[in-house]
Image (cartoon, rainbow, N blue to C red):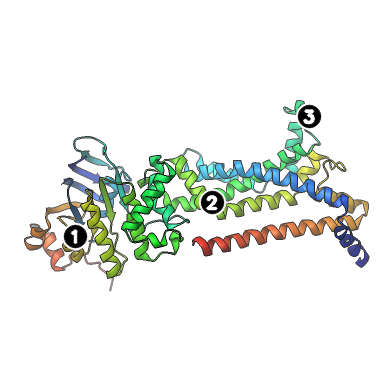
Amino acid sequence: MFPIRLEQVHFTPNGRAVLAGVDLCVDGEGITLILGPNGAGKTVLLRVLAGLERIHGGSVAWNGAGAPAERIAMVFQHPVLLRTTVADNAGLGLRPLGLSRPEVQRRAADVLGRVGLSHRARDSARHLSGGERQRLALARAWAVRPRLLLLDEPTAALDPTATEAVESIVREIRTGGAKVLMTTHNLGQAMRLADDIVFIEAGRVREHSPAARFFSRPQSQEARLFIRGELPWRIAFPD
Amino acid sequence: MGSTLLDAISLLAHLDPQVLAIVWLSFQVSLGATALGSLVGLLLGTWIAVAEFPGRAAVTVLLNGMMGMPPVVLGVIVYLALSRSGPLGTLGLLYSPTAMVIAQTLLVTPLIAALARQTVEDAWSDYRIELTALGFDRRLAVLTLLHDCRYSLVVAVLAGLGRAMSEVGAVMIVGGNIDGFTRVMTTAIALETAKGDLPLSIALGLVLISVVVALNALAFGLRQWAMRRYG
């Protein structure tokens, strides 16, 4: 499955270049943070890897193959939870796998324990707080035992406490052997979590380097500006 | 007028056998038709909501249009199909409760399917990406959406039952309103009113109104409970 190699990947819906020639190589270890301003193409890049978007040019190779050989899971910024219990939602991703009901229940209970939601297993998922919802979404993804976990700004709408809980779970999933690829525009989070950083801007990868080097000696001008908070991407309002 | 109403209430209070028989047959026919219509309508509506195929918009428009199909027109179509010279004439179903079930099934199926399509399509627009990312195929997605929208879909089913219980044209044409055999509440009300037997008409009317109001109350209560329970 690894390395995942993207070469000149273009995604141009209605002629708009959302991904404008992405070249990237992702190995199978650790947490890779995809960093960049809003509209840079971070989410679309994850959706391409999840098979949710068909690219308009270039190629994606999974250890040389056209499709991933192992399981991928994705958690969205605003996860959709079904109108049922927390436990049922945790086991949702297992339905396509054809597992027995006891096995689904066992795995769901296991991941709910790991994300600290066992006590809410029988509650309605839609009554959870924002942080609990995101932990449940992580549990749902974790239950399928993915080799690659894609996280699309999972803490964007969370307070610091809930963010810390999610980051702790992400680290545990990484420790369990899954490769984590996560988007964020939060520099603090990138410093706390990342093993390596992919900086993307205007649909192109501007830099891909180990996290320590990215923050101490960014190689690209765009990354330097982003880290310093100098915003060439500032939204212009009419006078 | 007052004495007529008292006579009607007396019929209900004394559980008049004629009234009970008519009410019982009405429930049998309408519940049977709603069950069949739900089976077909829920699956059809959900499939249209989720599937992508050429002409989907036209099918949706047709389905929505069929919600307003006049029962008498449908009754005539079923009558022609089941009449001795019709394609299904050899089955000998005309003027039987089975024919009434067929007619009402055809009447409520588009209604249930159209309501289900709208409900599930709204849910699908929310869930599509997430379920696709989880590896759901269309069949599994349909089953999951049916379960997730179950309380809204029950309302669609109750709407279908309400339409079946209250229609008169189709069952009159294909059932024939035969006393003790195919006479249901709506056809009995029409006939007895024409004959001047107002107490029986009013008694049946009270039952019919009660049923329709009870169905609406049930649908309302169910939605309220589901919103509180599942959000």
Instruction: Tell me the residue at 25%/57% (across/down).
Output: A170
Asked whether residue B70 appears in the rendered view, the answer is no
In space, the residues marked 3 and 2 are separated at their CA atoms by: 37 Å
Task: Tell me if residue A175 comes above or below residue A230 in the rendering.
Answer: above
Are discs 3 and 2 located on one and the same chain? yes
Which of these two is toward me, A235 or B121? B121
Instruction: Tell me the residue at 68%/57% (across/down).
Output: B215
In space, the residues marked 1 and 3 are separated at their CA atoms by: 75 Å
Q: Is residue B9 left or right of residue A17?
A: right
Q: Is residue B26 left or right of residue A161?
A: right
Camera-near label (1 vs 3) is 1
Q: Is residue A195 left or right of residue B118?
A: left
> Please, what is the three-letter code of the amino acid marked with disc 3?
Gly
Q: Pointers 1 and 3 in contact (CB under 8 A)?
A: no
Instruction: Tell me the residue at 50%/60% (across/down).
Output: B230
Camera-near label (2 vs 1) is 1
> Where is residue A195 drawn, in percent x and y?
15, 55
Q: Which residue is mark 2?
A: B118
> Where is residue B32 drawn, in percent x and y?
70, 43
- Within the image, what quadrant is residue B41 found in? top right
Outermost residue to the bottom:
A239
Mark 3, chain letter? B
> Where is residue A34 drawn, in percent x and y?
20, 55
Q: Which residue is mark 3?
A: B92
- Within the image, what quadrant is residue A213 found in? bottom left
Question: Tag 2 or tag 3, which sits nearer the N-term?
Answer: 3
Circle 3 SS class: loop
> Where is residue B15 drawn, in percent x and y?
86, 56
In space, the residues marked 2 and 1 are separated at their CA atoms by: 43 Å
Q: Which residue is mark 1?
A: A193
Which of these two is toward me, A219 or B207? B207
Circle 1 SS class: helix
